[in-house]
Image (tube, rainbow, N blue to C red):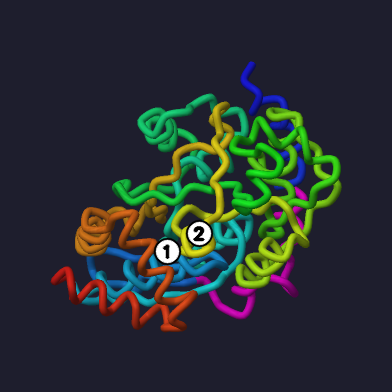
Amino acid sequence: MTPRRLIASAALAVATLALAACGASSDPLADQSAAPSASAGGAPVIVGSANFTESQVLAELYAQAMKAKGVDASAKLNIGSREVYIKALQDNSISVIPEYTGNLLLYFDKNASATTAAEVEQALPAAIGNLKLGKASKAADQDVYVVTKQYSEQNGITSLEDLKKVSANAILGGPSELKDRAYGPPGLKSIYGATFKQFKPYDSPAVKVKDLNDNKIQVAEFFTTESAIVDNGYVQLADPQSMILPQNVIPLMRPDVAGNTAATGAIDSVQAALTTEELTALNKKVDVDRQDPDQVATEWLTSKGLV
């Protein structure tokens, strides 16, 4: 049994509770009637996004690329965490969502044993039920744990395996949903033996960066495409046990969208053109340069001849 299986039951229970909590009063889509399904005849396609910058940019890229090909497409941004937007896909409130291969697999199959990118992609279609996948991009965005260079040097921390030396007196920071993820505190404890003094949730990446730099937290979870990692010289901690699976960008969609060749062709063109380096640059334009996701998407699509 892999270490990941040891935390499967707990993670599944938490995910179930989180989904049950998404009632009418908290669902950001509750004020919408069910969206029309997409078809080759041109019915509307709504591209949703999660509640972070990169997902918003990707949603705009997909929606604008489809619109340029004659598809009636629009973006519905900042829906929430995976527990919320998967439900929105299933109840037809949205049509497409940008996803990440490894975390998507673990959401549907907590006992997944895949570790390589190829194994993850092979396992996904059977795991996601009646939903469909587009083509995976070479662009990838890994969850990663980081520490400051000073903290790394002072404590000899370069790997997740090293965290057990300091975790009892350290605070871990990350997005609120990380607390119950298989690769969050439960995985750090069961796989790497690291039990933190406290987990501190952050809605604002900028505040998380400031607190890490000010030593108010000692370890933080980021995405590898966040420019803050390079800009601040953070040390990315190695993951020798492959707790965090490969995370290539992949569109998740309803079956009716998968049957719309104009829609899938437009999304595929984005997936084929996108690189990890470009994704990092697009995120920085929003997070640092304060540009709007739709503007950033338009500029990139234009540069690639996709609009």
In terms of secondary structure, where does tag 2 sit?
Answer: helix
For image coordinates 73% across by 42% down, the residue present is: 185
Q: Which mark is residue 89?
A: 2
Position of residue 130 in the picture relative to residue 297 (left or right) = right
Place of residue 195 in the rendered image (x, y in percent of width and height, measured from the top left): 81, 38
Residue 64 appears at what percent x and percent y? 29, 75
In the rendered image, the residue lying farthest to the top is 1
The quarter of the rendered structure image containing the C terminus is bottom left
Which quadrant of the view contains residue 240? top right
Q: Which residues are magenta?
A: 16-34
Q: Earlier in the sequence, mark 2 or mark 1?
A: 2
Count of picture labels:
2
Q: Residues within 10 Å of mark 1 (few under 14, many from 20)?
A: many
**Secondary structure mainly formed by the magenta segment:** loop
The spot of residue 92 in percent (x, y) is: 49, 63
Structural distance between the alpha carbons of marks 2 and 1: 6 Å
State the residue at coordinates (43%, 81%): 289
Q: Is there a contact, CB below 8 Å, between mark 2 and mark 1?
A: yes
- Identify the amino acid type marked 2: Leu
Residue at the spot x=74%, y=32% of the render? 9
Instruction: Give the residue at mark 1.
Output: 95
Vertically, is 153 above or below 229? above
Residue 173 is inside the magenta segment = no
